[in-house]
Structures are given as structure tokens and as C-alpha cells.
Image (cartoon, rainbow, N blue to C red):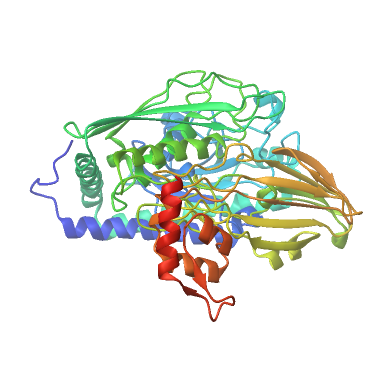
């Protein structure tokens, strides 16, 4: 490790350049957000930008989704390995191969090597989840795909798409001929390249302003500083081995028992190392729920950072203090080709984030988090069909209408707009009105469900419920939901969050409950409805401040019955204006509940 006390270390300049680089990433982000065409990118913000060094270390990621950016350096290494000495200024590469560093085939990543005075100093990385990638079904989440061939996606293992700043049109024609919405894809394609090229321009300007030598010194110091911050964070932990487990829901005959998951976390404060052991997990499964190595690494590292000091920089410097033990051919390790990793960015990945962060709650009150809400169900389905409003033109897009509830923590209640553990609240939720303008669908309702977050001293966020259907022509709806059998767990006495459920409602109003993995056709006058999961609670609900319980009831997050039955809080008055906490009755009720427990 380079010691940041060396003579040329300037903490002020290091902070200035670090913020300048974060600013470049935010400009990349704004470019992609504003220029992309598909709703999954320009509405839901399901993309991430980062900058890696020329020797393939993650330097900065600003506000990227953890599942996307914590493996950026694996993709830049693949680019360098494949291109070799042919790598040159003006190149841009397209990478979506889960077997050479990418997350899953649905994430198209644009890699631009940045040369300064002939030296490959950085690589700009822009990764965007696609609305369609040419899979056998109109979705980027092929839960039932036995292998990568059954998915059907075009795979680009760091393929050059620009040379000397000119487009390689052969690749463009390949994508246009396979993808269902070629013009929409091409707009996203140009936006991704544009975001990476913006970073190239700004990084060159940065090197001109400060000089290449000072920028290279900054990189060295930034990694050393980040590693030292991580060392300090780990040394505040006890010497302990933590073990935790969880499970992904069953999936019909393919996974009748679901996917059991186990993690062992060894914390060594003396050596300032955290080892994450995922060896004790089942082999690859014959469907799309296998983790790519990038997703296994990113999701477990996310769980670690969620439980540590939030100010520790997330980059390859701090990563030096985390050691992963992974197994080849493992559902949560390194996959064995050609097993499908189609759903690698969520589902099992979300479970890994949860079991890692919640394991830290074993250290005592004030540590770790509960499990965050799960479930890419109806509220996050991929919808497709033909739009009667525009000459029956095809449409494909993923909705992000409803969020799962965030986990309770030692200090705060769960976020309502949490989304999923792998996204960490960084994605946006769709506008109902915009979705109805973009697609020929009618959204019947979108609402919070009172009393669905895991109760606790700090409660999980409540679940969201949504219902929608087509306006005219039939619509295909596909989702790969988890959390319908095994809900997000509470910790330290906190209760579990609500599990996911879904229905198809016929034109006659009859409801048919749907399985967790759904591929269905919805016709005019029919609709689907369902809820994501609520977040798990943290701590004993009887220790929750009664004033918080009152506010929750007034805001509609909790019910009056749960306030009495679970939190032991009794109110006087019947309407909102007159409702008050009855202190004496509350003390008696809490005493009664403690005795019963």
C-alpha cells in the first residue's frame, strides 16, 4: 500500500480533483439520461457511469447503481485483454458478455479508452440496461432460459464499435436486425457512446489543466487514501466470524425448493481485512437465476459497504481490504458456461445484498440493517405489444412503477422509494402519466399499502401496489419476481416485510392469482395487479417512539390496529385531528405485550 503521508501528498488537491472527476461522471449521467430514448433509461435511470484507470482499477462512480459499477474494472480488463496492442485513441467498445466481466446480457456497456500523450490513462464506462436485446422473449430477464443459447441475446465480448471515432456499421446492422425496437435501441446506443465520449473530452481537459503527472499522482493518492479509510472502518469492528443464510423463492418444477444461499463473513480488524466466503452454495441452476462473477462480487461488496461508514470511498482502493472466496460452477460464484445469467442483476443478487448487510446486525444494536424489499413483479414488468395509436408500431419497455420498501436501520426507517437492494434507491420511479403517454396502457392505481413494512424500533418501508392493463390491443407482460414465498426479514426483533403477490383480473372481475415468474397475455378490459415487498424492520417494535407510531398512522403508513397490537400504542380520539397518544394506556398495553411474549 502507498502511504498517503509521502512528501508529495496534497490533501486539498486530492479532494479537488476527486470532486472534479465525480463532476465528470455526473455530466456523463446527465448526457445519458437526457439523450436516451427508452423509458428504462430516460425515465427509470437504470444505468450507471464510472471511470477506471488505464490499468483497470475502478477510480470513481459518483451515483452509479452498485450492481453496475462495482465490476466496471472487470469489463475494462476484458477490453484490454481482447484488444491488446490494437487498443488506440478513437476506439469505443460494446460489452455485454456475463462471462467476461459484465453483469448480464441486458446491460450494454460502452467503453472508451482515454489516451493522454499517447498513454492509456483512463477508460470511460457507460452502462445502460436495455429495453430489448433480441432475446427469445421480449424481455431482458429470461427466468426460464436453460442456458445462454435459450436466452437468444446478441453477445458482445468487448467488440469494437468505433475506430478512429467512426462507427463500425456492421455491428449496428446486427443489432438493428435482431432487436424488436431498433430505432429506440439505436437512440440509446448513441446516448451511451455520447456519455463515454463526454468523459473522454473532460478527462483530457483535466489533464491539460493540472498536468498528467499531477493527475497520475492523484490516482495513486486517492487509492491509498480510500484504502486507509477502509482500514479505519474495519478496525472499528470486532474480531468475529458472521454466518447468515437466506433463500430465493421456488420456481415451479425448475426450482421446487428455491435457491438456498449461505455466506460467511470473517472480520479481522488487526489485519484490516474482510473475507466473504460464498463457497457453500449450490451449483449452477438450469434457469436464468445464476449470478455472473461481476454480480456476485458487486452484490456482496454492496452488503459490506451498507454496513460500514458511509463516507468510505467506493473504489479499487477500498476494495483491496475485501477478499472474496468464490467457487466455479456455483449459483453465487463464477458461472460455468453456458448457464444463463439472464436475471443476474436482481433476485439472487438482491438476496446476497440482504444476507450480507443483515449479518452485521449480529454484532449488536447499532450494527447492520434489516433486509430490504424484494420483487421485480408487476410494478417492474417488461411490457410489449403493438401500439394502436401509431399504426400498430411495436413497443417494448420495462416499467418501474412500483418500488419495494427499504429496510429499517439502526438510525432510521426504510426508504419508501428504495427500489431494490442492488439499486440502493438510486433509480427513479416512473411517472404514471408519462408511462400512459409512452405506451398504450391504462394504470388503474398506484398506492402504498398501510401496515406492510416490517414493524420495528425502526420500521421497514411499506409496500407499493399497482394495477394496469392495455387500452386496446393485447399486451405481453413478463416479470421474474422474488419475495412471494420468502419475504424480507427483520433483524434484532424487527418483523418481516410483506411478501409479494400478483393477480390477473378478467373482464368479468374474476381474479386469478399468478405465480412469482409470469409470462402472460393481457387483453383489453383485463388487467394485472400486484404488490412489491415491504422492507424488514430493525429492533423491537415495543421500543419505537410512540410519537413515530402516531405519525405513521396519520400518514397512512401504519394502521391503528397494528399500532395497538404490535407497537402497543393506544390513541384517544377517533379522527385524525383529535387523535392523541394515551400515555397510561400505552404503558399498560406495552407491558401486557411484553408479558405475553
Q: In the rendered view, does 338 fall on the left or right side of 230? A: right
Find the residue positioned furthest to the right.
Answer: 508
Location of residue 339 (image quadrant): top right
Viewer-side residue, 395 vs 193: 395
- Residue 40: x %, y % from top left: 63, 53
Which image quarter is the N terminus in?
Answer: top left
Taking the view exactly as shown, the residue that stands out farthest to the bottom is 577
From this view, report whether residue 74 is shown above or below residue 544: above
The image position of residue 436, as x and y in percent, is 75, 64
**Left or right of 575, for residue 356:** left
Residue at image coords 18%, 60% = 12
Left or right: residue 322 versus residue 162 is left
Of residues 316 and 10, the one nearer the viewer is: 316
Residue 20 in picture, x, y percent from top left:
32, 60
Q: For residue 490, say whether it is visible.
A: yes
Residue 86 to residue 496: above or below: above
Front residue of 243 and 451 = 451
From the viewer's perspective, is residue 234 above or below residue 468? above
Q: Quadrant of the C terminus?
A: top left
Amino acid at each position: 500500500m502507498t502511504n498517503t503521508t509521502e512528501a508529495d501528498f496534497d490533501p486539498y488537491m486530492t479532494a479537488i480533483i476527486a470532486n472534479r472527476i465525480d463532476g465528470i461522471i455526473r455530466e456523463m449521467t446527465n448526457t445519458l439520461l437526457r439523450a436516451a430514448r427508452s423509458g428504462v433509461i430516460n425515465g427509470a435511470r437504470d444505468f450507471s457511469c464510472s471511470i477506471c484507470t488505464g490499468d483497470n482499477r475502478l477510480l470513481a462512480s459518483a451515483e452509479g447503481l452498485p450492481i453496475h459499477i462495482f465490476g466496471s474494472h472487470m469489463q475494462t480488463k476484458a477490453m484490454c485483454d481482447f484488444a491488446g496492442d490494437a487498443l488506440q485513441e478513437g476506439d469505443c467498445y460494446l460489452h455485454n458478455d456475463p462471462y467476461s466481466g459484465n453483469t448480464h446480457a441486458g446491460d450494454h456497456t460502452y467503453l472508451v479508452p482515454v489516451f493522454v500523450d499517447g498513454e492509456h490513462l483512463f477508460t470511460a464506462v457507460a452502462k445502460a440496461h436495455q429495453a430489448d436485446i433480441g432475446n427469445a422473449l421480449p424481455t431482458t430477464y429470461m427466468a426460464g432460459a436453460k442456458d445462454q443459447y435459450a436466452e437468444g441475446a446478441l453477445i458482445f465480448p468487448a467488440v469494437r464499435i468505433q475506430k478512429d471515432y467512426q462507427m463500425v456499421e456492421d455491428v449496428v446492422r446486427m443489432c438493428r436486425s435482431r432487436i424488436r425496437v431498433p430505432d429506440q435501441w439505436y437512440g440509446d446506443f448513441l446516448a451511451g457512446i455520447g456519455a463515454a465520449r463526454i468523459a473522454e473530452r473532460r478527462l483530457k481537459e483535466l489533464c491539460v489543466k493540472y498536468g498528467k503527472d499531477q493527475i497520475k499522482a492523484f490516482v495513486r493518492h486517492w487509492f491509498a487514501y480510500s484504502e486507509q479509510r477502509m482500514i479505519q472502518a474495519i478496525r472499528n469492528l470486532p474480531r468475529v466470524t458472521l454466518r447468515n443464510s437466506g433463500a430465493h423463492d421456488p420456481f415451479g418444477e425448475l426450482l421446487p425448493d428455491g435457491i438456498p444461499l449461505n455466506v460467511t463473513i470473517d472480520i479481522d480488524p488487526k489485519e484490516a481485512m474482510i473475507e466473504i466466503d460464498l463457497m457453500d452454495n449450490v451449483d449452477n441452476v438450469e434457469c436464468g437465476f445464476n449470478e455472473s462473477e461481476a454480480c456476485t462480487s458487486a452484490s456482496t461488496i454492496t452488503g459490506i459497504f451498507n454496513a460500514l461508514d458511509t463516507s468510505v470511498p467506493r473504489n479499487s482502493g477500498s476494495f483491496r481490504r475485501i477478499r472474496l472466496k468464490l467457487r466455479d460452477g456455483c449459483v453465487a460464484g463464477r458461472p460455468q458456461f453456458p448457464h444463463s445469467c439472464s436475471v443476474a442483476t436482481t433476485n439472487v443478487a438482491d438476496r446476497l445484498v440482504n444476507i450480507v448487510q443483515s449479518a452485521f446486525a449480529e454484532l449488536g444494536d447499532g450494527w447492520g440493517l434489516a433486509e430490504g424489499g424484494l420483487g421485480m413483479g408487476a410494478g417492474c414488468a417488461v411490457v410489449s405489444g403493438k401500439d394502436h395509436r401509431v399504426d400498430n408500431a411495436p413497443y417494448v419497455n420495462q416499467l418501474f412503477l412500483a418500488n419495494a420498501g427499504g429496510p429499517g436501520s439502526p438510525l432510521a426507517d426504510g426508504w419508501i422509494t428504495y427500489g431494490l437492494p442492488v439499486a440502493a434507491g438510486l433509480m427513479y420511479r416512473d411517472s404514471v402519466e408519462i408511462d400512459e403517454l409512452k405506451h398504450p396502457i391504462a394504470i388503474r392505481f398506484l398506492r402504498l399499502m398501510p401496515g406492510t413494512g416490517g414493524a420495528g424500533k425502526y420500521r421497514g418501508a411499506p409496500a407499493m401496489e399497482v394495477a394496469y392493463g392495455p387500452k386496446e390491443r393485447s399486451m405481453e407482460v413478463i416479470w421474474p419476481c422474488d419475495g412471494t414465498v420468502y419475504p424480507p426479514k427483520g433483524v434484532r426483533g424487527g418483523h418481516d416485510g410483506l411478501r409479494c403477490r400478483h393477480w390477473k383480473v378478467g373482464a368479468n372481475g374474476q381474479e386469478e392469482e399468478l405465480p412469482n415468474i409470469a409470462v402472460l397475455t393481457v387483453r383489453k378490459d383485463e388487467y394485472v395487479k400486484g404488490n412489491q415487498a415491504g422492507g424488514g424492520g430493525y429492533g423491537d417494535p415495543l421500543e419505537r417512539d410512540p410519537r413515530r407510531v402516531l405519525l405513521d398512522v396519520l400518514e397512512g403508513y401504519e394502521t391503528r390496529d397494528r399500532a395497538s397490537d404490535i407497537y402497543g400504542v393506544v390513541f384517544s380520539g377517533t379522527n385524525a385531528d383529535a387523535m392523541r397518544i394515551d400515555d397510561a394506556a400505552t404503558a399498560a398495553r406495552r407491558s401486557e405485550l411484553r408479558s405475553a411474549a
